[in-house]
Image: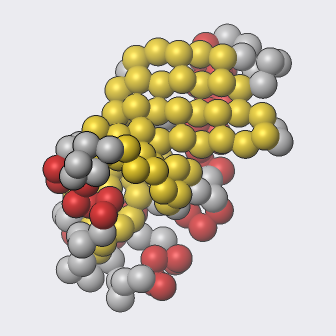
């Protein structure tokens, strides 16, 4: 598969995991400089360029992003086989329009609505990527 098709396939996989349909792993550095990884649902994504997550301002994810923005995101599966690893930075967004845009039904379990003052959006911006898809679809590494 050519690089453009591999990127498109990765974007398709990420899009299929948005909202209540799936999750990925978000890894960040904690206050002591150690990596910490946890699963998180994806609110919205723009291909592999950026991925938005919904969280609370008091969450470890938001706190860690405030201390050190460096992070990594991983989507993987054994059937069909793929591993999409993205490396970049996380920013904490509290703009009301962004919160409204990223809100999805499942967030109602945790927040009263997109206007909830504790609700925030974590936007992961990709700097580099490693797309390991099955042999028929190809593998690709690069920088954005």
Q: Nearer the viewer, residue 82 or 20?
A: 82
Question: For the N terminus, which image quadrant?
Answer: top right
Q: How is the image coloured?
A: secondary structure
Left or right: where 63 falls relative to 131: left
Q: Residue at x 56, y 51 (%)?
A: 24
Q: Residue at x 53, y 16 (%)?
A: 141
Left or right: where 85 falls relative to 113: right
| Residue 11 image position (x, y, % from top left) | 58, 36
Left or right: where 90 falls relative to 110: left
Question: For the C terminus, which image quadrant?
Answer: top left
Q: Is residue 59 above or below residue 82?
A: below
Q: Residue at x 67, y 11 (%)?
A: 2
| Residue 34 image position (x, y, % from top left) | 32, 44
Q: Residue at x 62, y 53 (%)?
A: 17
| Residue 94 image position (x, y, % from top left) | 20, 64
Q: Nearer the viewer, residue 74 or 51?
A: 74
- Quarter of the image where one finds residue 90: top left
Q: Is residue 63 above or below residue 16?
A: below
Left or right: where 14 falls relative to 60: right
| Residue 99 image position (x, y, % from top left) | 30, 67
Residue 50: tell me if it is visible.
no
């Amino acid at each position: 598969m050519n690089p453009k098709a591999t990127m498109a396939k990765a974007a398709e996989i990420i899009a299929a995991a948005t909202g209540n349909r799936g999750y990925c792993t978000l890894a960040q550095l904690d206050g002591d400089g150690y990596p910490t990884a946890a699963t998180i649902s994806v609110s919205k994504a723009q291909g592999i360029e950026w991925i938005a997550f919904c969280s609370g301002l008091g969450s470890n994810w938001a706190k860690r992003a405030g201390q050190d923005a460096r992070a990594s995101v991983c989507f993987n599966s054994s059937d069909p086989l793929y591993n999409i690893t993205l490396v970049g930075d996380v920013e904490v967004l509290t703009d009301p329009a962004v919160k409204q845009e990223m809100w999805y039904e499942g967030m109602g379990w945790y927040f009263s609505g997109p206007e909830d003052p504790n609700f925030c959006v974590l936007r992961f911006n990709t700097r580099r990527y490693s797309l390991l898809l099955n042999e028929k679809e190809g593998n690709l590494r690069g920088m954005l």
